[in-house]
Amino acid sequence: MKVVILAGGLGTRISEESHLKPKPMIEIGEKPILWHIMKYYSAFGFYDFVICLGYKQYIVKEFFADYFLHTSDVTIDLANNQMQVQTKHSEPWKVTLVDTGLHTMTGGRVRRIRPYIGDEPFMLTYGDGLCTVDLNRLVEFHQSHGKIATITTVNIGQQKGVLDIGPDHVVRSFREKSDRDGTMINGGFMVLNPEIFGYLKDDTTVFEQEPMRRLVQEGQMMSFYHDGFWQCMDTQREKKKLEELWQSGQAPWKIWD
């Protein structure tokens, strides 16, 4: 199953660093948060990634093109214009890097990567959040109910779009957050059937608006509740929190050797 990661936005709420690089390339422990997300997925056996790019896309492309240079010891012979990789730190990843437009909205970005997905279910998440979601259980749950969309829900209602979820896990309403909220939110880490492409009109489509509302109205969105660690990186304060967890050696999302 392919993993689609949205990594093309401007990241204006963490502009201290995002004016220099895409937000998914902001580093936690000297590695981009995008790398952490991919390492987490691959710990569950998901190795095929499609990255939706836009803002400063060349930085992401150069990171993967020079992956050995970023992650391995190398000897560079300047006299003979040669480079030898000494200790290879490779990953079992296939990474497709797609220019989905500079100003394209989230739904439009997903729509643009359809040729790389085909007619198979796929996973979708944002390039700025880490968690301890059991991804295998998430996929099993999605396959069990037969609906178009499964979204991971977390109980941090003051930050993202707010959900009303019935006892049968069916999402009954979806709306933008307000200051009064303390209920479940969309935490990313979604699984979608290919029918989702029929809900995405053009580059102006915001995935979290009309497509999600329509899925809810049609009873096609299910909730996978996660009560463990989840943290997005919208601000410098949140980046610092993730950095401190990593440096402590107790980062909850680090489940790989």
Image (cartoon, grey):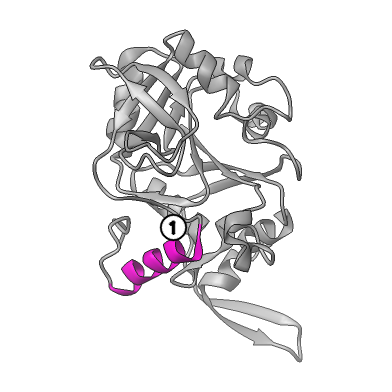
Q: Position of residue 188 (x, y in %)?
A: 44, 38
Residue bearing mark 1: 36
**How far from the left and from the top, in percent, is residue 177?**
46, 35
Q: Which amino acid, by three-letter code, is at mark 1?
A: His
Q: Is residue 211 above or below residue 237?
A: above
Foreground residue, 108 or 83? Answer: 108
Q: Residue 127 location in percent, x, y? A: 53, 49
Instruction: Give me the residue at 57% from left, 20% from top.
Output: 211
Q: Which residues are magenta?
A: 235-248
Could you tell me which residue is drawn at 35 percent across and 71 percent down? 244
Name above or below for residue 12 compared with residue 170. Answer: below
Front-lying residue, 235 or 129: 235
Residue 106 visible in image: yes
Question: Within the image, what quadrant is residue 83 found in?
Answer: bottom right
Say left or right for 49 vs 61. Answer: left
Residue 79 appears left or right of 177: right
Q: Residue furthest bottom?
A: 79
38 in the magenta segment: no
Image quarter of residue 36: bottom left
Residue reaching furthest to the front: 180
